[in-house]
Structures are given as C-alpha cells and as structure tokens.
Image (cartoon, coloured by chain):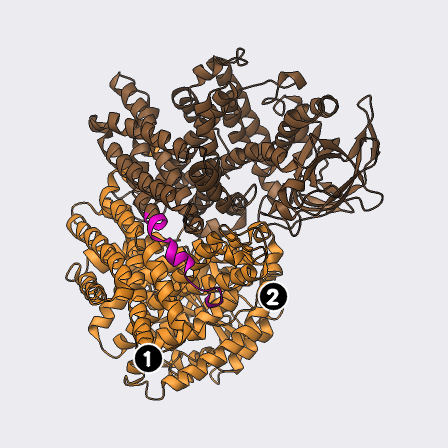
Chain colours: A brown, B orange
Amino acid sequence: MSTYIAPLRDMTFILNEIAGLEEICALPGNEECSVELVESILDEASKFATGVLDPINRGGDTTGSVCKDGVVTTAPGFKDAYKLFCETGWNAMPFSPEFGGQGLPAAVTMAVNEMWKSANMAFALCPMLTGGAIEAIAHHASDELKQKYLPKMVEGTWTGTMNLTEPNAGSDLAAISTKAKAVGDGTYLVTGTKIFITWGENDCAENIVHLVLARLPDAPPGLKGISLFLVPKFLVNDDGSLGARNDLICASIEHKLGIHGSPTAVMSYGEKEGAIGYLIGEENKGVGYMFTMMNHARVNVGLEGVGIAERAYQHALWYARERVQGKIVGDTGSDKKTILHHPDVRRLLMDVKSRTEAMRTLAYYAAAQIDKAHAGDAAAQARIDLLTPVVKGWSTEQGVELSSTALQVFGGVGFVEETGAAQYYRDSRITTIYEGTTAIQANDLVGRKLAREKVPGAAMKALLAEMAATAQSLEGQAALAGIAGNLKSGIAALTKAADWILATYEADPQAVHAGSVPFLKLTGIVVGGWLMAKSAAVAAQRLADGSDDVYYTAKLATADFFAAHQLPFAAAYAAEVTGGAASALGLEEKLF
Amino acid sequence: MSTYIAPLRDMTFILNEIAGLEEICALPGNEECSVELVESILDEASKFATGVLDPINRGGDTTGSVCKDGVVTTAPGFKDAYKLFCETGWNAMPFSPEFGGQGLPAAVTMAVNEMWKSANMAFALCPMLTGGAIEAIAHHASDELKQKYLPKMVEGTWTGTMNLTEPNAGSDLAAISTKAKAVGDGTYLVTGTKIFITWGENDCAENIVHLVLARLPDAPPGLKGISLFLVPKFLVNDDGSLGARNDLICASIEHKLGIHGSPTAVMSYGEKEGAIGYLIGEENKGVGYMFTMMNHARVNVGLEGVGIAERAYQHALWYARERVQGKIVGDTGSDKKTILHHPDVRRLLMDVKSRTEAMRTLAYYAAAQIDKAHAGDAAAQARIDLLTPVVKGWSTEQGVELSSTALQVFGGVGFVEETGAAQYYRDSRITTIYEGTTAIQANDLVGRKLAREKVPGAAMKALLAEMAATAQSLEGQAALAGIAGNLKSGIAALTKAADWILATYEADPQAVHAGSVPFLKLTGIVVGGWLMAKSAAVAAQRLADGSDDVYYTAKLATADFFAAHQLPFAAAYAAEVTGGAASALGLEEKLF
C-alpha cells in the first residue's frame, strides 16, 4: 500500500492563485487568517491525515462498523483517532469562535477537508455530518438550543446527524411520514423510522444530536408541512451534563458496497413513549432549514470526489513506479522499465491527475465564493448557487470514473481486495447518490439555477462572459494557444446548450430534464477547463519570469492534457442536450 | 430481486437480420442447423438460465467459493447446477461432433453464452475456460491427447484452465519462469507457480485439465522460448479411468472485488517431484497455441460485457417499474408515478438498453464472421481479426459503465449489497482486465490489426466503406435521416483517426499507443452505431410493410437514442487520438 501524502503544493497554488486567499483573508471576520498561517495549518493537517487517518482506512473497510443490540462499535482505531481529531482542534476549525470554533474561511476548510476525505472518507463523514448539523442549528435554532448544544458539537464531543430519508421518502422529501406532537411544555414527541443515517449511532461521541424531519398533526401535506427537530441520544440537563437516554435506537446498520467504516444506521424513534425533541425555528419550515445543511453537505460531498480521486491516483502512481512489466513500444533500450513508461498507463494517470486537479480547483474556487458571499458579495452568491450542483454532481461522477481508472493501472491485482484499489472504487460509488443524486443536482442546475433564476440565465451568462474573456486573453500566447482553442470550443458548446435550455424550459421542461445530467457534465468540463487554463496562465507567467519550479512545468502539461482530452467532450454533451431529448423520452413505458 | 428473462426477441432478430443466421446454417458443416432449431435451442437455454443459473447467482456472491487445504468448495448450488449443465448437453454445444459436441455455429453459441453470462457470470467462466482449453487441444495437440482428453472435456465431466500468469508475468508473457523438463518417456515434469487461474480448482469436475505455459531447459529467452503443456489434476490411465493425483495443488484462492462464485486459484506445480505434463504441439511454440485460446476467450469476455449490462438493465428496469417516488416534472396529474416516468431515469435506462443492444449486435455479428471465416471466407477472417479487440475492449468498458449506470437507478438502495445491483458493478470490473486489459486490446487494434496489417489499414478501410454505404442508403428515409447524419459524422471521425494512425505509426508508435484506447472506444461506438442503424433500417422496413410488432418500434427508438447520445462522442475520441498524444506523453516521469 502507498501512503497518502497531501498535495500541498497544488493546494496552496490553487488557494493563492485561483481562490484568492489573500483577498479572502482581508475580508471582515477573517482578520486572524493569513497566507502563512494557512500554510502551517495545511502542513499540520497533512501530518494528521498521513499519520492518523490513512493508516486506519483499510481496517475501516475490512472490519467496518458493527452493530449489536443497538450499540455500534466502530472499526479498529476509529474511536482513538476521533478523540485525537477533536483534541487537536480539527473538528472546531470551520466554526464560529462564538461557540469555540476557529472561524477559518471556507476555502481553507475545503483544503483541509480534502485531506480527511483522501485519507479516510468513511471517517471524514462523521465531522462532515456534525458540521451540517451545526450549520442548521446555528442558523435556525433558538439561542437556548445553540448554547446548550453547539459548544460540545463544535468541539466534537457530541456528533450530529441529518435524518431525512425514510423507506418511502428518499429523493422525495414530501413523502416523509415521521410524526411529532407537542407535549405542552415546549417539547415534542417524535415517532418514526429513518434510514440511511450516516454515523447515526457510534461509539466515538458522548452524545449524538439528531436533526429529524417530521410532521406535526394537522401540518399541510407535502414539503410545506415538515418541521425540523433536534432529538438528542441523551437528554441534556440544564447544567450541560447528560441526562436520561432518549427513546431512540439504532435498529441496524446497512451492509454496504463501500464506506464500511461509516455506520449507516436505521434509526427508530419513539418505540416506547416517543423520543423527546425540540423544534428548530418555526413549524413547517423544516425543509428550508435542512437545505442549510444540504448545501453545506453538497459541496463537501463533491469534495469527496476530489479526495478519493487524489488518493486513488497516488496509490496507482505508487504501483506504476514499482511495477516492471512488458516492453515499452518504441523503446530501443534493453533494460526493463516500470509500467509508468507505457503510453497507456501514462494516459490513464494523466487522466486521473488532470481531472483531479480541475475538480480541486473548482472546489476551492467555489469555497472562495462562499467566503465572499458570506461577506455580502452578491455576484459571489450567484456564482456559488450556480456551481454548488456542479461541484457535487460533476466531481462525484468523476470520482467514480477515476477510481475505476486508477484500479485499471493495477491490472489483475487491482481486482484483488488486499491491493486496496477496489476500496476506493467501492467507497466512491455512494458519492453520486447521497445528498441528492446526480440527476437531482442536474435538475437543480437547469431549473432553479438557470431557467427559473430570477433573471433566467443571468448567473450562467456572467460566468460564460468571464470564461470567454479568459480564453481571449490566452490566445496570443504560444504556450497557451492550444488550451485557448479547446476552451473556446467548450465555451461555445456550453453557450449553445444553455441557450437551448433557456428557450425550451417553459414549454417543455421534461425535454430539458432529459438532458440535465449531460448539461451538468458539460458545465463541469468547461468550468474545470477554464480554471485549469487560468492555472496554466499563472504557471506560464512564472516560468516566463524565470522561475525554475518544476511544479509550474507540470501544471502547464496537466492543463494541456485536460484541454486536449476533456474539453473535446463538451460538444458531445451539448449534442446530447440539444438533440437527445426526443429519443430519451420517446419510448413507451411498456416497451422498455 | 428481479428474475433474468433472456431477451429472446432481440437475440433472434439480431441473429436472423444482422448476423445472417440462414446463410450461416447453409455453410458446410452446419447442415443440421436451421432457424427453427436455433429458436428452440435459445428457448431451452433461456429456461436453464432463468431456472437454474440465475437463482444461485446471489449465493455465488455472498458465500462464494472457499478453499481449505487445497480443496475448493464452490458456492451453494453450483455443483448441482454444473452437473445438470453437462447432463443436458449445454457444455458440449459448441464443440465438434468428433468428440461428442453438437457443432453449433459460433453465432448460436454466442447467443446461448450470453444467457449464461447474464444469469451467472461467475458460473459461466467455468465452461468458458474449458472451451478455450478444448480449442487449444483440438487445434494443436496429438491425436492421442485429443482422444484421451477431449471427450470428457466436451461433455464437461472434466474442466479446463489456462495457466499463463505468474507473479512477475502478467501482461508480459515473455517473463514466464515456470519450468518443464523432459523425463525421457515422452512426458515432462513441470515446476512453478501460476496465479489468477480461473476455476483452477473446483469440486464440480472429476478432473481438471490445466494448460500450462512453461520453459524447457535451453529454451530461447522471451516469447519464443515458451512451450504449452497439458497437466491434468489426476493422471489418466490408458483406459480413460483416473489414475494417481498429479503433483499440483491449489495453494489458495483470491479474495476478489467480484465474481466470488468463480474460484481464482494460485496453482503450485511440482512441490514434490514435479507435475507430470504432456507437450502440446511443438516445443517453444506455446504462446502461439495459447492465442488460440485467447482469441476464443477474448470474444467471450467481450460477451460478458453484454451479459452483465443486460442483467443490470433488467434489474434496474424492474425497480424503476416498482418504485414510486417524487413528482414528475411537467406532469399536471395528481397520481403518483413510478420512477420510470422521471426523464433522467428514462435516459439512464435508454442508455443501458441502447448500448447493450449495440454491443449484442456487434458480438453476434462478430460470431457470424467467425463462422464464415471457418468456412474459408478471407474477408470475414480479416473482419473478425479487426473486431476481436473491439468486442473485448469496448464491450467490457461499457459493461463496467453500464452496471454503474444501472446501480444509479436504484438511488440509495443501490449501494446496499442486498439489493444486488452492487454485485453486477463488482463482477463487471474484472472484464476490462483479464484476457488482456483494454490497453492490450487497443494496442493490438492499432498495431497488428491496423498499422502493421499486411496491407496497412486494409481491413479498417473495407469496414469504413461498408459503413459509409449503409449511411448513404439511409439518408433518403425520413425516419432514419437523423441516425444517418450522426452515423456519417461518426464514420468521418473514425476515418480521420485511422488515417492519422496509419500516417503516424511508423515514425512514432508511442504517440499512437497513447491514443489507442480512445481509438478503440471510437471504433466501438461507430461500428455499434452502424449495426444499430442497420437494425433500424430493417425495423423501419417491417413497419412500412405493415407490421404491428412493437419490437420494431422499440428498436427504432433505441437506435435513435444510440445515434443521438453515443455517436456524438466519436468526434471527441478522435480528437483525443489525433491531438492528445503530446500531452499524454509530455510530462517527465518524476513530475507525476
């Protein structure tokens, strides 16, 4: 097995040159942040990822979490690692200082979180879910609930969960049937069964704070009749100490394809008298509140695509540098060479490398928009709204593909579980499903973020104009002309598809939705290609200025590969969008 | 779980209308074959697949094969199913009547084999490997060996294996180090370790006939110093009865990502005195003989891509017809509908359906070329030589993608193992690796089958001309004009890429190999699109002639989808081939 080493050089390059870290550090509230501080944080985080999380990742897969009589035992080393994770302050990093957090910008958190996801995606789900729950409580709960729950959750002693899904309510939250009724003392009794609850039960936390969507009696039907409740595993006394066990239990955990280290629980609420819960915000507004968690979680799940692709890349590269096999075509020398010299192995690795870097750049860029939007920048808010489904949908679809590509580098041993490549392939497969499938992201993109935007298409058009300006500016430079050409073609394809969607949506939304996933992939490729082109321009400038840093040489070559091997697919996806709806929708149901 | 139902209507359509079954039945040696007979064979096979093989497929995955002290116990039901498989004559079906086979054409065998692969891919590997061994023995061994081994192998009482791979000799057979030395009585003693031996040990067969590549003392180095030996698990007495146990043992079986029902053995030969083996054919010509098995196996592994995609499709379709979830965009009705009505679910299913049908058509078409070549048709031989790597490489790459697409239809439950979708995803992943990785197929395609052909490019040019004629003939027909347009663009892209390869190969073979896999995918899409277009033309004609068979309506819609959603990617792959070599090869090794 290879050891995970955080790609610190690429991370800091993207943060500094593309995400605009200096600018972000200058925003109100970020005064304590600086480029130097961030560098030392990333350095420390990389040590934690390499030294603590990476070594227990295999055992997380092979042993996994185990549930017996409602008690979950996490995989070997997970409990200790989590304790250390909290003690060293990593859990608190992204959150408001008001509740004990360090309040670091989203862009910095993004880079740090990538390391957790690369080193141990199953483990990283625990703080991710806690983070989502913290966001929802911080934005929508009463001060009393905040004071009582957030400090422990920020520190990580208590973890958090999202309880949305039920057996008959998956993508369709409107079908939720879990019930809540007011007791009269300000509390509620919750009854129902929730499934697919990530880290829903575990032995790492002293308490688990479940956020549960449920219906009050006489609530309106559908999405507008769902409220959000805070339902703790242990009730919390007024002095903050833990009280009685609440009436909720982990009925079982799922036997899954991957992320075995992450316990995915079936949670049963109120098998006896009802689980005591506390209303968050107002009645019947739960779905809106939950989206506070969802948007946070979506970008973070997109980041899982980046993290797992990076880890799979490092693992495959390690093997490609070790394994000697076969004669290299066109090689006239007689000495045996590693498979890294085979043209197709190089292509496979360049494919993973270039797409991973493009996804990383998009994720950090998106995080920078979150920071700017947080400081009141409306254009940044529009940009992150537009890009959230792309970060989630495109990066995860790629993570699945690239973990498969990385496995291919191993040949036969890739199919043997002990090699470890199969784990990344299996782990990654959930990412295009949870927190909204790729289709749900894509429908959000073509609907709310494009055709049903306040000014339809405004955010996309602003992005297209900015990208076109970049392409224009690169055309004159010899080293970048190839990239500029491919980027221009990509932008043209995206423009054509976006225009078609804007012209079609009102009259025929089904036709648009039939091509929404190809449109999402198209957007990802073009935006990824744009950000790689911007990176290439910086690298070319540094080299022209006399730098001998080979990182810039590599970045140029990697951007070149992305432009030549990914951007040509933009036209194909655009053709699917504009010319594929009739054939996608035409066949009668019975003829499938 | 859904039940596998063989797609008999599509199978017979392709056999009759595209593969030319009637013509094949008229070839010398096929006198006993007829369209009616084939129909009844397919019908019987479908019952066996549905009734016997499909029900034990899940247990093959969950229990798998187990090895203890060199003894392999196959998964529940496998032993009985195999016995029945042989007793009912399915194992003997493809082989020469001289040794007890039924001598059915390759095209028919292909359709029947698809059913085994759909219903139970792990099981189907056993007769596939036996079949490869039978081919090699029948073509290259002495009459004595043939008479002694083939009847039992054809009947299936004895199974066969291919022993190529060693820890240091995977894709590179030249590195084989297993040794053989002549004893003086015409036999040899074989010593060495072979890995990844499919069905290398099992409890289904009374004897296992291993074909083993090994080196004789003083053999020349490399590929030209490797001989092929028949090494039986039990020695066979002159009267055909089983004698002493040979000095070979299954050291262990692999813990794999998928196909758990298929025991993948580490075989140890000659731990004591040496395993007794019999030379097949002449010394040092083993690699050539092994290719008799390999070509047979490659087409059959390509067929695994078809089979697993079909099975995954049926499973996902079953779920899409059952599962009610969410409001359908643009639907003004109030009743809840199944997810099959969601535009993106339709697109996902059409994607799997159309690509599976295209792959099936290619596989049966390729089999028809085998039958014709067998009867002396040189053009058919050139065509099957050209298409073998495409059938193997393209169909398996698609099988992996499509089993993932099918899993996506399930949403969250797709990630839960009990649903069964994950098994197809895991099982399919080996197919792009064994019997030569996709890169090895692609290098064969651009090298021996194109640029290093006797007349370079001749076979591809003949195919391109034939495809262009089809596109031309469809252009005038309104129902087919869309398909024709996309097909023409695809052919243009393939022509451009093939011309570039022919112009580049001699001076820069590395550049060609850097794009060989995209070229293979490009070829698959265009040839698949061509065959779907031919199918659409037949369907359109039947409908114009007044047929009310909805199968033709569905075929037209499916071909239309393939043309609109797959053929546009041809240009992108061509761009990778012609414009992507420099960036694939440019980065220095140390900068990865």
Which numbered tag is attached to residue B21? Answer: 1
Using a 10 Å C-alpha cutoff, classify the residue at mark 1 as few (fewer than 14 neighbours), some (14 to 19) or many (20 or more).
many
Q: Amino acid at mark 2?
A: Ala
Using a 10 Å C-alpha cutoff, classify the residue at mark 2 as few (fewer than 14 neighbours), some (14 to 19) or many (20 or more).
many
Foreground pick, B210 / A492: A492
Magenta stretch, overall SS: helix
Q: Nearer the viewer, mark 2 or mark 1?
A: 1
Q: Is residue B150 magenta-colored? A: no
The answer to whether residue B370 shows anywhere in this view is no
Q: Is residue A586 magenta-colored? A: yes
Q: Residue furthest top?
A: A31
Q: Residue furthest bottom?
A: B32
Which numbered tag is attached to residue B75? Answer: 2
Q: Amino acid at mark 1?
A: Leu
For label 1, the SS is helix
Q: Residue at x 56, y 57 (%)?
A: B337
Q: Where is B296 relative to A505, above or below?
A: below
Q: Locate residue A484, reporting x and y percent.
A: 25, 32
Q: Where is A70 relative to A552, above or below?
A: below
Residue B462 lies in quadrant = bottom left
Mark 2 and mark 1: Cα distance apart in space: 37 Å
Instruction: Please report the bounds of the magenta region as a residue range.
Output: A575-592
